[in-house]
């Protein structure tokens, strides 16, 4: 109210502004508050997106390192416990799983050539046995892991080493 013109009568009593002027100033103040509120919400949304993006990028950067460490830990565990006695064949199962992932990651064309007796240079289209090998090659680790998990659940003597 400090910037409203103050009209005084003889007794120095201020005259209130017109209702239209009050309404106009009230609407201006409401717009300013809404504008500030929208900017604050926008800022919070931008900060939340930045934090989520930072977490995602960090996670994606650390994910390969975590997989490599877990893979090395699995090899170490298998090498330490492959000769332990157990009532179910968990040691050989883990050895097969690790060997399979190693061979298929690094030597897939060679394994396909030996197992399927086919080389990509021979034909334009892969024969059915090669396509089945490639499809089964993607599913085998999951099925094998589920099989080993069921064996681990049935195990009585391997609970310490597994």
Image (tube, rainbow, N blue to C red):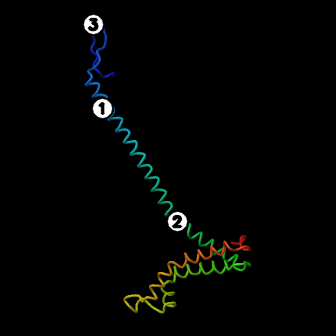
Category of crowding for the residue at label 2, using alpha-carbon neighbours closer than 10 angstroms: few (below 14), some (14–19), many (at least 20): few
Left or right: 121 in relation to 112: left
Q: Label 3: which residue? A: 10
Question: Which image quadrant for residue 122?
Answer: bottom left
**Above or below, 93 relative to 73:** below
The answer to which of marks 3 and 1 sits earlier in the sequence is 3
Left or right: 5 in relation to 156: left
Q: Is label 3 in contact with label 1 (beta carbons under 8 Å)?
A: no
The answer to which of marks 3 and 2 sits earlier in the sequence is 3
Q: Label 1: which residue? A: 28
Quadrant location of the C terminus in the rendered image: bottom right
> Residue 25: x percent and y percent?
29, 28
- Give the Cα distance between marks 3 and 1: 32 Å
> Residue 94: x percent and y percent?
63, 77
- Give the Cα distance between marks 2 and 1: 52 Å
- Give the Cα distance between marks 3 and 2: 81 Å
User: Element type at marker 3?
Assistant: loop
Please name which of the two marks, 2 or 1, marks the residue nearer to the observer. Answer: 1
Q: Nearer the viewer, residue 101 or 143?
A: 143
The answer to which of marks 2 and 1 sits earlier in the sequence is 1
Left or right: 27 in relation to 111: left
Question: Which image quadrant for residue 79?
Answer: bottom right
User: Element type at marker 2?
Assistant: helix
Q: Which mark is residue 63?
A: 2
Q: Nearer the viewer, residue 29 or 139?
A: 139
The outermost residue toward the top is 10
């Amino acid at each position: 109210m400090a910037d409203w013109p103050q009209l005084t009568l003889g007794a120095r009593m201020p005259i209130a502004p017109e209702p239209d002027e009050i309404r106009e100033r009230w609407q201006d103040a409401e717009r300013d508050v809404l504008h500030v509120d929208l900017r604050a919400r926008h800022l919070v949304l931008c900060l939340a997106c930045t934090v989520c993006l930072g977490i995602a990028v960090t996670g994606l950067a650390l994910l390969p390192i975590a997989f490599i460490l877990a893979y090395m830990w699995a090899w170490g565990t298998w090498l330490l416990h492959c000769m332990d006695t157990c009532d179910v064949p968990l040691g050989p199962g883990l050895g097969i799983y690790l060997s399979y992932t190693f061979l298929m990651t690094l030597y897939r064309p060679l394994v396909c050539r030996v197992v399927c007796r086919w080389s990509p240079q021979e034909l334009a289209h892969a024969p059915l046995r090669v396509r089945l090998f490639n499809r089964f090659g993607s599913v085998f680790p999951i099925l094998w892991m589920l099989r080993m998990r069921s064996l681990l659940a049935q195990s009585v003597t391997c609970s310490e080493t597994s």
